[in-house]
Amino acid sequence: MAEVLELKAARGARGTVRLPGSKSISNRVLLLAALAEGETDVTGLLDAEDTRVMREALARLGVSLTEHAGGIKVQGVGGPFREKKADLFLGNAGTALRPLAAALAFSGGEYHVAGVPRMHERPIGDLVDALRSVGARIDYRGKEGYPPLMIHPAKISVARPVSVRGDVSSQFLTALLMALPLTGKPAIIEVQGDLISRPYVEITLNVMQRFGLLVERSGWARFVIPSADYLSPGGIFVEGDASSASYFLAAGALGGGPVRVEGVGRGSIQGDVRFAEVLQAMGAEVTMGNGWIECAGRGKLRAIDMDLNHIPDAAMTAAVLALFADGPSTLRNIASWRVKETDRLAAMATELRKLGATVEEGSDHLRITPAKLKPGAAIDTYNDHRMAMSFSLVAIAGVPVKINDPQCVAKTFPDYFRELETIRA
């Protein structure tokens, strides 16, 4: 693919898209299948950079992964990793590096865990502090509080509740939830502060239950993990990615539609299906069934003022939709954008302004006032797949746009631009 992708103005959008597997579910399933007793046949798995680095890491840790026509068979090790020395590279995949680091802390080996330079700017200190509180031995190999990490054998004790902050990233809690069963003892996690991105923790609990481990929770502040081993469910299907669905559904709202996505729908375990509520608040028509969602535009979009803490990834799609609304829109409670693949608050504000919008960037919100858009703007993507996918929608609304470094979509959706082309009118 070219280093700059020129997207011509479309006259609309309509059609059907089959979604790739959910990134969030895929990496959770891969890790738990690796730690479980028995073989798990995983179908619908996402094939993209974030899942490839997880698979490569698991293979280095002695897990057998065998591809077949419909998916991948994972032969679980039935507890902590047996390989006691490994050097692991996890790209910019927070869904891989953070839970894996926690599992390695309880595996009794020497492990070096690293990623790309941006991953080394994404905080992990709250997770490391929580792991150290139960005896884990972890050293920072660079800046304090950030990867890369060196993990050593340690004597672990979970006699007291494990405390972790919940207001920076829900992945810290997810990592502890998934890893603590490896200690072989019951454990309690207490969350300090307001837990953000709660739907992602719900995905974690759901996948753990599929592998035989039921966690009890009191609200979002206390989680009780039983003393039990992970057991393979035999087979597990990964549903389509709801975050990826947001771009095509938004295209339906902007381009008239209808646009239908298949692979995710009513009954999904992913919080990002609630992006449908944003589309409806903006005046689009959304219908949903088992395994599908459809969106059609109904004239000019309405401005919104919404708290989007529960759907931080899909909220980026809403920021681009705000360019086409009938007044200023405010997206609130999105401070977690600052510690994602890039500082998404700053990046989004910068690129929206290139198109002509007036943008107020707060510590945890964006206020976007639409204006006459500038055609042909070159959008920088900051090696962030969601920047590229979000801003591609400008062309669907009839304004040509250039996307710099379009290859960054390989992180979660390598065929994104090809799929987008199939619904352009």
Image (spheres, rainbow, N blue to C red):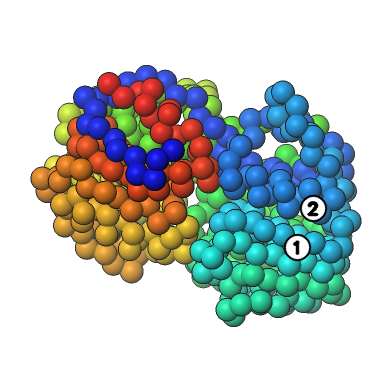
**How far from the left and from the top, in percent, is residue 407?**
46, 44
Image vertical order of residue 128 relative to residue 184, above or below: below
- The quadrant in which the N terminus is found is top left
Question: Is 63 on the left-hand or right-hand side of 100?
Answer: right
* Residue occupying image coordinates x 25% and y 41%: 401
> Furthest-bottom residue in view?
144
Image vertical order of residue 375 relative to residue 156, above or below: above
* Residue occupying image coordinates x 51% and y 64%: 118
Mark 2 element type? helix
Alpha carbons under labels 1 and 2: distance apart: 8 Å
Dot 1 or dot 2, earlier in sequence: 2
**How far from the left and from the top, in percent, is residue 148?**
64, 70
* Residue occupying image coordinates x 87% and y 48%: 77
**How far from the left and from the top, in percent, is residue 256?**
25, 24
Q: What is the number of the mark on residue 87?
A: 1
In front of the other: 99 or 68? 68
Of the residues shown, which amino acid type is indicated by label 1? Asp
Q: Which residue is mark 2?
A: 60
Question: Is 204 on the left-hand or right-hand side of 104?
Answer: left
Mark 1 element type? strand
Question: Is 177 on the left-hand or right-hand side of 125?
Answer: right
Residue 394 visible, this angle: no
**How far from the left and from the top, in percent, is residue 340?**
47, 59
Are dots 1 and 2 in contact, CB under 8 Å?
A: yes
> Furthest-left residue in view?
372
Task: Report which quarter residue 296 is drawn in.
Answer: top left
In front of the other: 75 or 190? 75
Of the residues shown, which amino acid type is indicated by label 2? Arg
Categorize mark 2 by other alpha carbons within 10 Å: few (<14), some (14-19), many (20+).
some
Residue 22 visible, this angle: yes
* Residue occupying image coordinates x 79% and y 34%: 66
> Furthest-front residue in view?
2
